[in-house]
Image: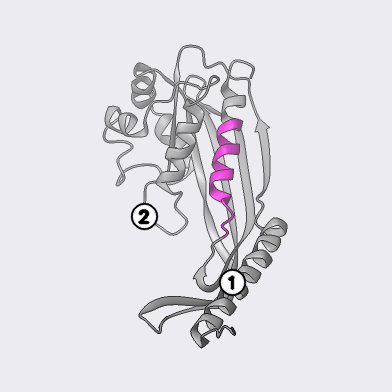
Amino acid sequence: MAHHVGRHAVIRFRERTAGSTIALIAVALCAAGCGVQTTVQEVRQAQTDLGDDAIVILSRKHKTQGETEDDFVACVSAGVNGGNDGLPVLPARDFVDATFPWFEPRTAPRTMDDLAGVIGRPLISERIQEIGVRYLVWIEGTTQRSDESGTLQCTVVSGGIPACFGFLSWENGSNYEASVWDVYQGMNVGTLSSEASGTSFVPAVVVPLPFIARVRQAACTKLSDQIKGFLGPTA
């Protein structure tokens, strides 16, 4: 007995076939482009000795374009403090409260030069030493999205089902620099940098399939490891 296939079943089959094809193509493209490339650099200007002291990790707090993201600073702080080789890190909020009002958002340093001027004041330097902080790590940088291409359109098809069609791709780049200030010596003892880049894709045949290059996480991991190596016992 002959079997008849309905028109909607054929359409659904074609959509599944097209979706599978797009997914396979996206996976192949992601294998070539979604990987994250990282670059690290280190410039040491003096030897370091953390001893029994702690470090604090800060960034500029003024709400301007290009400000380092708070969650990136939190990520680096957690990374430096975590693991078997973790270093003692004083939470930024505790540091700001202990040094009030010099590091509050309205009065905090805007640049590394400003930071050097603030910490260079004997009263502030003594207060920072009192709370057990030897090194202050000042992070600058951002993650930016660029070179976006393609289009992605979403609509509601028959039966009230949302569907998206198209293809998007873009570049993500993270570029961060950490300056390490020795409170005891009153000088910048080194500069560390972490860069990461990658391409993200979102193909869509009914359902979008995002393949995201996690560049900021990669930059955080690399910079955390750099700080550990720079200030740790083997430094």
Of residue 60 and residue 231, the one placed in the foreground of this image is 231
| Rendered position, 9 above or below 110 | below
The residue sitting at the top extreme is 52
Which residue does the image show at 31% across and 45% down from the upper left? 105
Q: Residue 159: which quarter of the image?
A: bottom left
Tell me if residue 223 is in the magenta stretch.
yes
Which residue does the image show at 65% across and 28% down from the upper left? 45
Q: Residue 122: which quarter of the image?
A: top left
The residue sitting at the front extreme is 1
Label 2: state its secondary structure: loop
Q: Earlier in the sequence, mark 1 or mark 2?
A: 1
Of residue 35 and residue 226, the one placed in the foreground of this image is 35
Give the image's coloring scheme: one colour
Q: Position of residue 42 (x, y in %)?
A: 67, 35
Which residue does the image show at 31% across and 36% down from the upper left? 102
Callout 1 amino acid: Gly
Callout 2 amino acid: Lys
> Label 2: how many residues lie within 10 Å, few (<14), some (14-19) or many (20+)?
few
Residue 189 seen from this side: no
For the magenta stretch, what is the residue range?
211-225
Quarter of the N terminus within the rendering:
bottom right
Tell me if residue 166 is in the magenta stretch.
no
Residue labelled with disc 2? 63
> Label 1: how many residues lie within 10 Å, few (<14), some (14-19) or many (20+)?
many
Residue labelled with disc 1? 19
Res. 176 mark: none
Which residue does the image show at 58% across and 74% down from the upper left? 167
Of residue 152 and residue 109, the one placed in the foreground of this image is 152
Q: Position of residue 201 (x, y in %)?
A: 59, 65
